[in-house]
Amino acid sequence: MMSEGKPPNTILFSILTILIICCWFPAGTRAKNSSSCVSSSCGQISISYPFRLATDPPNCGHPDPIFELQCLQNRPILQPKSGKYVVQSISYANFSVRVSDLGIVEKNYTSCPAYSSDSLWDTTNYMSLYLQSNKDIILVSCLNPVNRPLYVEDPACGNRTDFLNSSRVYNYLVVGWVPDSELAENSCREDRRTLVSSDALSGNNASYTMIHDSMAYGMGLSWFRALCGECDRSNGFCSLEDNKIRCHHYCYEDTPFEERSFRCKLDYYGALIFVVGVGIASLLGLRFILGVIFVIGFLLYKRRKQRSSQDKNGAIEHGLDPESSAVELEKR
């Protein structure tokens, strides 16, 4: 005896509905850590994927060299292509890391940044400057004194190499972006720049010690791109939204069909899929209604035929002519 199952059209409609529900709306890309390694530590900093210490197995972190940290004097050191930065904290919740220039020593106000943060721009595809939470600190040297609120005299980190023929050079720390025209107007030249977290420096009347403390606190970098591998492989656009990694696929008219991702095709042809789905649902609904009507009619017909058969059998048992019995029944 064959087992009863769903009609083929119903199964196809169910599969189509599930695909539309699962793939119609954009979904987040989960942060994946395929490593089973135990977290390391250096000083007070816990280190796990995508970061790893140089002494950890290579498979315990992201393959890009930027995520390999050195532990020097109990301090984790981030080493881009140029420069060294002390890792002050790592937030695995919002995919950020706070680092400070190795040349800056906390509360040592004669220490100076050794590197320019500009070098971080070309460091890697996986680490980016966290611009929303950072402020520029520019070290400038000037031939003439500058009397402006944002120019804070720098007694320790001056650079005379640009003005070797001058007997006096004025050195400043400037908070924020300064146009080249303003520097030229004041006979100033930019020496180097660094970034500081806006959480450590607020207001426009910062003193030298406040700026130095903010440089020791460090700047924020975002590393969420390290967890976008699956999205990148599917030609998606990876972004960080509300501390969640999202993968979006965009479709354009000139994008070849074979180069579009499965979800991209669903998004692009979503309207057609919706119309087809509604059409299939309508046909199935109509078929169901007609089937119900047919079943009810068939049952009524069988019931009437059964009653007629019972009446004839009763008439025969009483010795009556079935036709005359039927007439009698109609008269009654």
Image (cartoon, rainbow, N blue to C red):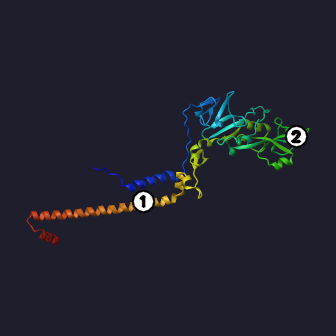
Q: Tell me the amino acid under the disc marked 2.
A: Phe
Q: Secondary structure at mark 1?
A: helix
Q: Is residue 128 left or right of residue 114?
A: left
Q: Position of residue 48 (x, y in %)?
A: 60, 34
Residue bearing the label numbered 2: 163
User: In 3D space, how far apart are the residues under numbered discs 1 and 2 (Cα atoms)?
Assistant: 81 Å
- Looking at the picture, does residue 198 appear above or below residue 111? below
Pointers 1 and 2 in contact (C-beta within 8 Å): no
Q: Position of residue 135 (x, y in %)?
A: 73, 43
In front: 254, or 2? 254
Question: Which quadrant of the figure has residue 126?
Answer: top right
Q: Position of residue 25 (x, y in %)?
A: 53, 52
Q: Tell me the amino acid under the disc marked 1.
A: Ala
Q: Which quadrant of the rendered structure holds the C terminus?
A: bottom left
| Residue occupying the far left of the picture | 319
- Residue drawn at x 33%, y 61% is 291
- Looking at the picture, does residue 249 appear above or below residue 221? below
Q: Is residue 82 left or right of residue 30?
A: right
Q: Secondary structure at mark 2?
A: helix
- Residue drawn at x 12%, y 71% is 324
- Residue drawn at x 21%, y 64% is 305
Q: Position of residue 285 (x, y in %)?
A: 39, 60
Question: Which quadrant of the figure has residue 315?
Answer: bottom left
- Residue drawn at x 60%, y 58% is 254
Mark 1 vs 2, N-terminal side: 2
In front: 235, or 94? 235
Residue bearing the label numbered 1: 281
> Is residue 94 at all visible to an observer of this figure?
no
Question: Which quadrant of the figure has residue 219?
Answer: top right
Other residues around mark 1 within 10 Å, as few (<14) / some (14–19) / many (≥20)? some
Q: How many marks?
A: 2
Other residues around mark 2 within 10 Å, as few (<14) / some (14–19) / many (≥20)? some
